[in-house]
Image (tube, coloured by chain):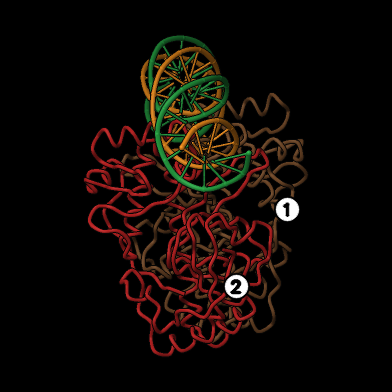
Chain colours: A red, B brown, C green, D orange
DNA sequence: CGTAAACTTGAATCCACTCAACCTCTGTGG
DNA sequence: CCACAGAGGTTGAGTGGATTCAAGTTTACG
């Protein structure tokens, strides 16, 4: 199955909107987004959605599925900047700066809501409240990247992994995935290693250590956090929870 | 000398605008920015301009001086998210999300251009081109943080320090600081260490190693890069140079 | 002249890395 | 139906880059 385009969900019936992770839409906004959205894209897992250095004519909001944003250094090493979840907006850099500064790849099969880059200016000129939200989204992203920098710079391997697992867990729960203390996570250990600046071997061993402590189990695409509070404490995360943010 | 407020430069005569690091202003934009700017702030080195968790009523563009954005973890460790240079816009997170997710501190005496947070909406609703630029700025910031993540995750100590020195150097040159192969850098080694996730001791020894290689000398607030290209190569930086960006 | 801040230096330790196998699936083609 | 290949995961051993600890030195300044 290759990438396909098909008329699917409308903004009005968008299943993401119901999660209170996202700020509610007004009727006006809803109507506008309907015209801003140009279609839907389905891609297989493994597909590259945006390529570093390219200037995509399209912007996306992830409707379903997960992926990674990553950079490849000249040394050949890969850094996963962050993980991409439903509700995330991708392509803003290409939209504003002219070209992507990282790649985006689908880790699972993925459905994306498609916007035209050329419409961005229409958004700014005619729908300031949506423009405001877009900037808000950029600010939220900046915040998370700052947190990641703090993790890579100041946390040891165990804290980093605990931190990542908690963040992934919280985000998925807030978007309606999983149930109880278990969420579906289909990333590979290598993805996590590349995200945290750790070797695959050490990531593996540290995951086992967390399992031995009875804090986290991650097998066969299922992540189970038995003692979330304890894990968050180990990760030096202050338990503020996720703040509401806009959705594109 | 404490913080003082005094009518100084007007946007029309703003010395930053002349550097081609920044995209030019139109007459309209210039006129509007004059009304958006509410004053100037001078602070001594060591001052905290924005505090993590606070919701500043003010936003700033740095006119002169340098500083750091940083977070403090529960463990007491400090992570410098990035350095702040003239032309940088600070306070966007507080402006959009309600509160700062990191602190901003002046490392040298600093002059800032002051805006009122309440005026942000006026900017979005009446000056879409400026709103667009603001989002652009956020996207640029996101790009740099992504690069930093790649550095902390994938580069070793020598590469990280080389990377940081080159980036600092390029940015300062692009804003008219220093001459020849030397620029003024008044950060402490501890700041650099905290930015790169390295210990002070190792930062010190690595700086000496770079000096021994004849690549970089940093003493008494003067950073001299003798062989920029070679240093950039060591740092795995592709020599694209700095891209034009908007200025607030 | 004394104190504090920033910078240096040396030594011992350890966290995380690399290397090198090996295991366990799953899908595929003879 | 079985052999094989490839991807993802696991395990052990040895190494080394970066850390911590603990003193120094230099510089700025009241």
Q: Earlier in the sequence, mark 1 or mark 2?
A: 2
Q: CA distance from mark 1 to mark 2?
A: 20 Å
The answer to whether C19 is drawn above or below residue B5 in the figure is above
Any part of residue B15 in sight: no
Is B63 placed left or right of A14 in the picture? right
x and y, in percent, of residue B26 in the image: 69, 80
Q: Chain of mark 2?
A: B
Q: Which residue is mark 1?
A: B241
Q: Is residue A165 visible?
A: yes
Q: Quick check: A44 left or right of A204?
A: right
The relative height of residue B132 versus residue B19 in the rendered view (above or below) is: below
Label 2 crowding class (10 Å Cα cut-off): few <14, some 14-19, many 20+? some
Image-based side of B161 in relation to A235, left or right: right
Q: Residue at x 43, y 68 (%)?
A: A87
Q: Nearer the viewer, residue A66 or A77?
A: A66
> Residue A64, position in %: x, y?
44, 66
Q: Position of residue A107 (x, y in %)?
A: 50, 54
Instruction: Please give the residue where the numbered disc 2 appears in the rendered image.
Output: B133
Residue closest to the eye, A123 or A213: A213
Q: Nearer the viewer, residue A110 or A68?
A: A110
Q: Residue at x 31, y 65 (%)?
A: A176
Quadrant of residue A52 in the image? Answer: bottom right
Contact flag, marks 1 and 2 (Cβ < 8 Å): no
Q: In the rendered image of this protein, does residue A71 appear above or below residue B230?
A: below
């Amino acid at each position: 199955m290759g990438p396909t385009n098909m008329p699917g969900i409308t903004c009005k019936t968008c299943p993401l909107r119901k999660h209170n992770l996202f700020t509610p839409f007004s009727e006006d906004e809803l109507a506008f987004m309907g015209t801003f959205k140009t279609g839907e894209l389905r891609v297989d897992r493994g597909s590259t959605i945006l390529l570093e250095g390219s200037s995509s004519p399209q912007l996306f909001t992830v409707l379903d599925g997960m992926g990674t944003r990553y950079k490849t250094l000249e040394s050949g090493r890969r850094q996963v900047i962050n993980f991409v979840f439903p509700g995330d907006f991708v392509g803003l850099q290409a939209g504003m700066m002219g070209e992507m500064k990282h790649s985006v790849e689908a880790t699972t099969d993925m459905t994306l809501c498609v916007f035209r880059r050329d419409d961005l200016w229409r958004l700014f000129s005619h729908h300031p409240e949506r423009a405001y939200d877009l900037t808000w989204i950029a600010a939220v992203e900046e915040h998370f990247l700052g947190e990641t920098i703090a993790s890579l710079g100041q946390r040891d391997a165990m804290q980093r992994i605990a931190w990542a697992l908690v963040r992934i867990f919280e985000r998925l729960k807030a978007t309606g995935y999983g149930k109880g203390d278990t969420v579906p996570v289909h990333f590979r250990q290598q993805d996590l290693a590349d995200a945290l600046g750790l070797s695959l071997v050490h990531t593996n061993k540290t995951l086992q250590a967390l399992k031995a402590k009875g804090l986290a189990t991650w097998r066969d695409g299922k992540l189970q956090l038995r003692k979330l509070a304890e894990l968050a404490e180990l990760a030096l995360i202050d338990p503020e929870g996720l703040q509401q943010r806009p959705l594109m």
